[in-house]
Amino acid sequence: MKRLLPLVVLLGCSHPVVLQPIATTLPADGRLHLAAILPNTSSLSAPPRTLLQQDGPNTKLLVRAPVTPGTLRLAIATKTLPMTFTPDQAPSRSAPNLPDWFPLHTAEDRDAFRRWFTAVADRAADLPPAKLPAEISDCSALLRYSLREALRAHDDKWYADAGRDMPTLPSVLQWTYPNTPMGNGLFRTRPGAFTPSDLTSGTFAQFADAKTLVAANSFLLSRNLARARPGDLIFYRLLEDDSQFHSMIVTGPHAEWVVYHTGPVNGTKGEMRRVLLADLIHHPDPRWRPIPSNENFLGVYRWNLLAEDR
């Protein structure tokens, strides 16, 4: 049984409209699709899920597909256009180990994600230890927490839970966690190309350690810090410490900071830290210097979610 999505109304036009449907069955892939063509009219305005695009004497009506199957009704003046969205089980062209609907397709959504991801991480660094969410217990836990919170719908309930001091920013529109075909499963847990069976086999889960975040959830951008943008990740593999993996989040308007959790240290729970990259390059322990000559430094990584930004 298909899910009935909310009615989408194109506002401002009350006279009859000659509507030429182009496609009424589309994949639930989070992309913009051409749904119909109608005459140009300056009195018609589009709600968030749709886009009006002038094309000579006509106007193209584009609709952003959801990522979950269902039926959407577009109310256009005196007409209603039912749109059916079918399961999208194709692999992503930009991140083949993910379904196509998972990576963010628009620059606006990718920017919104970066801003939220870094805001959540920076706030964690600002909190007194007693108020830090209990789940943030090491470096990979900070990444998981910040990613999940960045992808939620930032409504009144979210602000009530997270704190009213969080910034007011546009949320990602393509999809929100956990409202996807994978539910709570946000992290890929094994290597390999995406197949439809991954959605039900446990391939995607709520947990992934730092090693898995490197191997299956992000891609190497560069070993040159100049390529880093806010929201990118820095990974290390300490060769003299049982090959442990460690991670940091790049923040700051100019990607000049990193935020991370130390993990347990000397019998303590460890702590959140914020360090200037310029200082980290000269860290007294050379294993932590993010420079190409340091073989413990894996490089600057980017979430597969942002694979269309390469």
Image (cartoon, rainbow, N blue to C red):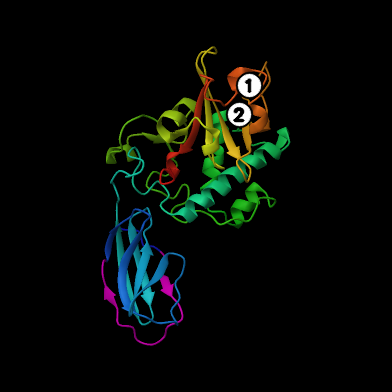
Kind of residue sitting beneath label 2: Ser
Pointer 1: what residue? 264
Kind of residue sitting beneath label 1: Pro
The residue at the far bottom in this view is 15
Residue 294 in magenta stretch: no
- Give coordinates of residue 185: x percent, y percent: 42, 39
Q: Is residue 200 visible?
A: no
Q: Is residue 157 above or below residue 92?
A: below
Q: Name the residue nearer the viewer: 84 or 263.
A: 263
Q: Is residue 32 above or below residue 181?
A: below
Q: Are marks 2 and 1 in contact (CB under 8 Å)?
A: yes
- Give coordinates of residue 62: x percent, y percent: 36, 66
Q: Residue at x 41, y 43 (%)?
A: 307
Q: Is residue 298 above or below residue 173?
A: above
Pointer 2: what residue? 137
**Circle nearer the N terminus (2, 1):** 2
* Quarter of the image with the N terminus in it: bottom left
- Give coordinates of residue 115: x percent, y percent: 57, 48
Quadrant of the rendered structure where residue 30 is?
A: bottom left
- Give coordinates of residue 225: x percent, y percent: 55, 34
Residue range of the region highlighted in magenta in the rendering: 6-23
Q: Residue at x 45, y 76 (%)?
A: 45
Residue 173 as seen in the image, left or right of residue 141? left
Q: Name the residue nearer the viewer: 138 or 310.
A: 310
Quadrant of the rendered structure where residue 85 is?
A: bottom left
* Quarter of the image with the C terminus in it: top left
Residue 247 as seen in the image, left or right of residue 276? left
Mark 1 element type:
loop
